[in-house]
Amino acid sequence: MSPPPTAPPTPTTEPAADRRLRVVSGSTADGDAVLALLDGTPIRVVLPTAPAWRHQVLALALVDLLGRLFPLITIDCDSAASAHPLLPPGPPLLRPRLEEAAGHGALGRTRPPGAPPITIIVGDAVADGPIVGPVVHVDGAGWQSYNGTTPPRWPDRDWPMVPVGPLAAACRAAAQATAAALHPVSGAQVPPASAYASALTHTASPDPIDDGHAGSAGAWQNPAISAVMAGAGSIGGAAAYALAMTPSLAGTLTVTDPQQLEDKNLDRALLATAQTTAQRLWKVDAVQRALDHHEALRVDTYRGTLTDWVASHPEPFPLPLVLTAVDSRQARTAVQDCLPLDVVNAACHPDEITVSGHRTGTGPCLCCLHMEQVMDTTTTRARLLERATGLNGRMILHYLTADIPLEADVLRQIERHRGLPPESLSQYENATLEDLRAGELLYGATAVGTPTGTVAVAAPYVTALAGVLLAAEALKSATPALAGYRLGPDGGHIKYEERVQRGPLQALLTSPPRWAGSECLCQSSRRQRLLTTRYATFG
């Protein structure tokens, strides 16, 4: 959910030059203090002696995420341990895979440790010698994750070979470790209370959760998905990462995205590496490469938007399940305008994830959830933006209601009004005023309060968790016995929201109503007729 439209304080000096963070307010010293903790805090990851498949999946994602923020990562793993045969292709031994994953963030390991290590214990592993410093316990099995301060207490159960629980656990453990590392500056609670969380039922508890037969191996079949995914960036790429870890995946997946990987994607995109960003690999090609080992899965790619892909077909056709991993309200509106019937949406705002399920014509559509933001053009909001930007109220209302792209001269005016360096808002050229407001909150970032300001630190675990839960909904839809557990109007709830730093115990599971007015796309009588014809729906 979007916070109130307040303007951020103005930085007094240039921020520290590091892609992992940005000084929102304060001075360079604030950024340097956070950077010193990222570079000087050792992270120790301890694996069981003979790690099972689920522990290998968890550890690979964990060190990959941590390696995008921390250069000092130590991996305690038996050097002779073999990589599980159900993992995607790679070196035959586990340790080289872990070392490779830890290096995806392209951070050097040159600075000496400046603090006691943060120790992350995976599963039932036992660390050698005494432990000095914070300890995080993490485990995952089937659809469930565990993150806490003590070892997990799993029941004796036949777990399905589902990567969702281990991957969600890895994301939350990376968040806990980051909070622990930044505690000397932020003073944030580290770590949150121990919690078990189920991505099958979207419930959380201090005690193990009983998912019943649906969470057992007996209910799990080799899934055959039929979907199109709009967006292959940090969220869509994480969804593809989860699908790549799913054994025996079959079916058809079409992926659309108009962009290539860039250096900035190393902050938060699991499929971005130093090599692929240097090559400026198309994001859809990175997804295809990640899924290439699934012989029974057909992956089609399109270097454009979902709207462009639909328009490339000569005749209208019914869309399969649409997975949306786009990062703006305008892009989600464009997806809904393509007349999908079934949609799963994942988003970040900015350190909060939301995943929601939709069936057009039944319950809220993808646009209904954001219509209140669209309609919120009150005088109060306009005045807040007027003070923040220096633009006059009439111009602000024009930019807000018509989604007019911001020109360079307007951005220079805002920079002068706020006392910002010239060109510091250049990334918002051709974006909207709403994008500029939301951008100051930073997509997929954690705001770290310092004694004199605020520093936004890249949060790869946020976008990764959103992508993992997006993939979870796709896997449920591909398994008949689990379809009833999907988010959406036919399930128990429509939307799941979680502040990753706070953990799943404080997450929200809600069923927002359909937008009552005529402004939403799903209320268009013409679209309803087209939808009925295209999908043979009635009523």
Image (cartoon, rainbow, N blue to C red):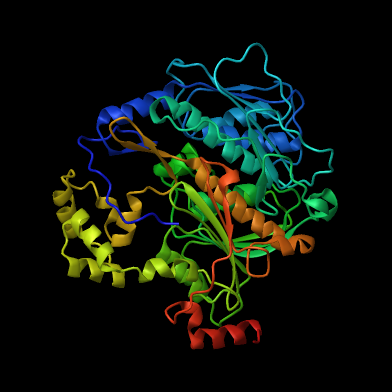
Q: Which quarter of the figure has residue 207? A: top right
- Looking at the rendered image, the quarter that the N terminus falls into is bottom left
Picture coordinates of residue 257, whole percent (x, y): 48, 60
**Left or right relative to 428: residue 465:** right
Q: Is residue 312 visible?
A: no
Question: Where does the image place residue 461, in percent across and percent down from the top left?
Answer: 52, 41
Q: Residue at x 50, y 88 (%)?
A: 525
Identified at 24% across, 71% down, the residue is 398
Along the viewing direction, whichever of 305 and 127 lies nearer the viewer: 127
Q: Residue, x 51% and y 68% (percent of image)? A: 366
Q: Position of residue 427 (x, y in %)?
A: 29, 51
Q: Is residue 273 left or right of residue 163?
A: left
Residue 157 % position (x, y) = 84, 41
User: Looking at the rendering, in which quadrant would you find the C terminus?
Assistant: bottom right
In the drawing, does residue 178 fall left or right of residue 250? Answer: left
For residue 225, above or below residue 238 = below
The answer to whether 515 is drawn above or below residue 217 in the figure is below
